[in-house]
């Protein structure tokens, strides 16, 4: 009975992502320009590629193609992270994956809160890359303590958000008016604050330790620092940015341009320098500036199996052993060439990717299944059924992130100074303690989606063959 009154988590997530988009477009005009470029590129792509169009029609809703796929925030304390997990759960978003960015000179570790089942992803795949600052990596003990105290004194959630999370957990959902209120209240946590909660002197010291530390510690909340729509042709977006007065980062992160897109490719425009003010000891405000907010674009390809992923990691590492992209972007063209060269070793046909078990696929019946070999169905021989034209396969989209790419996105938006070095110290156990839950293994998720499609096909075929 009561169940009926609840708004679904998917609907709350959709409403939240739409509200965020509207807020961000108002606050960061260059982002609105980027959205319009992405829509234009996607339109052109769909006109020229009817096959892609029908595949997307089958698996995705075409009209939502250019909508935001992710955003990112950076949190300061374990309590904030644990509470954020409960907030996202109300929207059907769960922590998937662990990303250690200390190796790349960024003192955070992260997860991505996202919908996990196929239906929820199709309804609205919005996700938030969520990082937690690692003060333990800062060398200056006194500054570390000052930062810790500053963070401990803030509450990034409104009292109503806290109350509604409790309501949702107790009752199993939110009714319509509470859901609308929840979206509005959670939005407050993601809003930009142009008044810092620290004075100019502390800001400067935090900033000198690492720009990211200043960004996390100095404000009343973890302002959303970017939103990211999905494009069908990221190279066209990268080329199109300057003509619209947007300055892109020097190169596209992730794999090179390919026939069969794998994993995730990303590019962004540089963070804006924005006016903020600092509170003086006499209560007056002085002006300063802060760079944090930017816009990003992503193109998603197939989710790779552990075997495919280690091939990806190896080829990326090989490339970077020879040429490391510099902070000023001066060797970007050479880097892109070297990357394309190295990735010649990664099969670029769906059939080969499937045969070599490099990626995950979703299977469906190609026809009515009547000509299927009974033996192959009984044995679950997928390869035979594919070769006989009984089954067709579509790539399963990668829904997660890539640590090397994420570090590149962080860095290009924290200013072009050379990367700082931190001791490499992945600590998933600590992160999970801070989060108050285990992170979900993404390989298991993709394997489960693939297996479910196989099971459904075999069950349908068993019926046709015996009928
Ligand atoms: C997050 C950067 C990582 C991505 O798309 O890889 C990211 C941040 O700058 O806070 O969003
Ligand atoms: Ni991003």
Image (cartoon, helix red, strand yellow):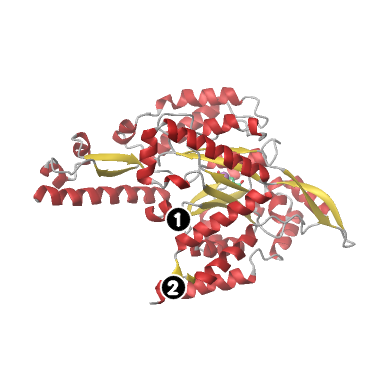
Number of callouts in the render?
Answer: 2
97 and 44: which is toward the camera: 44
Across and down, in percent, residue 452 comes to 29, 51
- One can see residue 5 in this view: yes
* Closer to the eye: label 1 or 2: 2
Q: Which residue is drawn at 40% across and 32% down?
A: 49
Pointer 1 residue = 115
Q: How crowded is mark 1: few (under 14 residues within 10 Å), some or many (20 or more)?
A: many
Q: Is residue 241 left or right of residue 169?
A: right
Task: Give whichever of discs 1 and 2 has the lower sequence position.
Answer: 2
Across and down, in percent, residue 233 comes to 49, 33
Q: On the rendering, which quadrant does ligand 1 occupy?
A: top right
Across and down, in percent, residue 257 comes to 48, 29
- Quarter of the rendering occupied by the N terminus: bottom left
Q: Identify whether 378 is placed above or below 175.
A: above
Q: Is residue 142 left or right of residue 246?
A: right
How far separated are the C-alphas under marks 1 and 2?
A: 22 Å
Q: Are marks 1 and 2 in contact (CB under 8 Å)?
A: no
- One can see residue 407 in this view: no
248 and 142: which is toward the camera: 248
Q: Which residue is drawn at 53% across and 73% down?
A: 166
25 and 344: which is toward the camera: 25
Q: In this view, does 332 lie to the left or right of 465?
A: right
């Amino acid at each position: 009975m009561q169940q009926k009154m609840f708004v679904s988590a998917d609907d709350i997530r959709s409403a939240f992502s739409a509200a965020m988009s509207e807020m961000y477009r108002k606050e960061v005009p260059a982002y609105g320009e980027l959205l319009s470029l992405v829509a234009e590129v996607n339109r052109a792509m769909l006109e020229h590629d009817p096959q892609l169009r029908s595949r997307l029609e089958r698996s995705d809703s075409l009209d939502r193609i250019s909508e935001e796929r992710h955003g990112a925030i950076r949190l300061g304390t374990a309590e904030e992270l644990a509470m954020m997990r409960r907030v996202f759960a109300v929207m059907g978003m769960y922590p998937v994956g662990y990303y250690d960015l200390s190796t790349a000179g960024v003192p955070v570790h992260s997860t991505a809160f996202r919908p996990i089942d196929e239906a929820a992803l199709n309804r609205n795949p919005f996700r938030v890359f969520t990082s937690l600052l690692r003060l333990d990596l800062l060398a200056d003990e006194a500054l570390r303590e000052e930062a810790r105290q500053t963070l401990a004194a803030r509450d990034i959630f409104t009292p109503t958000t806290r109350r509604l999370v409790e309501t949702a957990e107790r009752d199993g959902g939110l009714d319509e008016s509470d859901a609308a209120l929840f979206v509005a209240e959670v939005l407050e946590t993601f809003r930009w604050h142009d008044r810092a909660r620290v004075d100019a002197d502390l800001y400067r010291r935090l900033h000198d330790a690492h720009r990211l530390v200043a960004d996390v510690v100095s404000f009343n909340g973890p302002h959303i620092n970017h939103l990211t729509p999905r494009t069908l042709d990221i190279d066209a977006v990268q080329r199109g940015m300057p003509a619209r007065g947007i300055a892109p980062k020097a190169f596209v992160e992730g794999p090179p341009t390919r026939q069969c897109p794998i994993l995730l490719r990303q590019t962004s425009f540089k963070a804006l320098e924005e006016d903020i003010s600092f509170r003086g000891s006499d209560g007056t405000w002085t002006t300063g500036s802060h760079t944090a907010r930017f816009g990003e674009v992503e193109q998603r390809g197939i989710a790779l199996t552990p075997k495919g992923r280690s091939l990806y990691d190896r080829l990326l590492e090989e490339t970077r052993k020879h040429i490391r992209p510099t902070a000023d972007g001066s060797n970007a063209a050479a880097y892109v060439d070297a990357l394309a060269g190295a990735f010649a070793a990664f099969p670029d046909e769906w059939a080969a990717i499937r045969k070599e078990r490099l990626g995950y696929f979703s299977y469906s019946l190609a026809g009515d299944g009547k000509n299927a070999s009974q033996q192959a169905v009984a044995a679950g021989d997928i390869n035979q059924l594919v070769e006989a034209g009984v089954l067709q396969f579509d790539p399963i989209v990668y829904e997660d992130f890539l640590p090397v790419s994420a570090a590149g996105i962080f860095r290009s938006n924290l200013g072009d100074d050379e990367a700082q070095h931190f001791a490499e110290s992945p600590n998933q156990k600590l992160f999970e303690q801070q989060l108050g839950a285990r992170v979900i293994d993404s390989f298991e998720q993709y394997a489960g989606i693939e297996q479910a499609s196989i099971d459904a096909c075999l069950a349908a075929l068993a019926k046709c063959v015996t009928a």
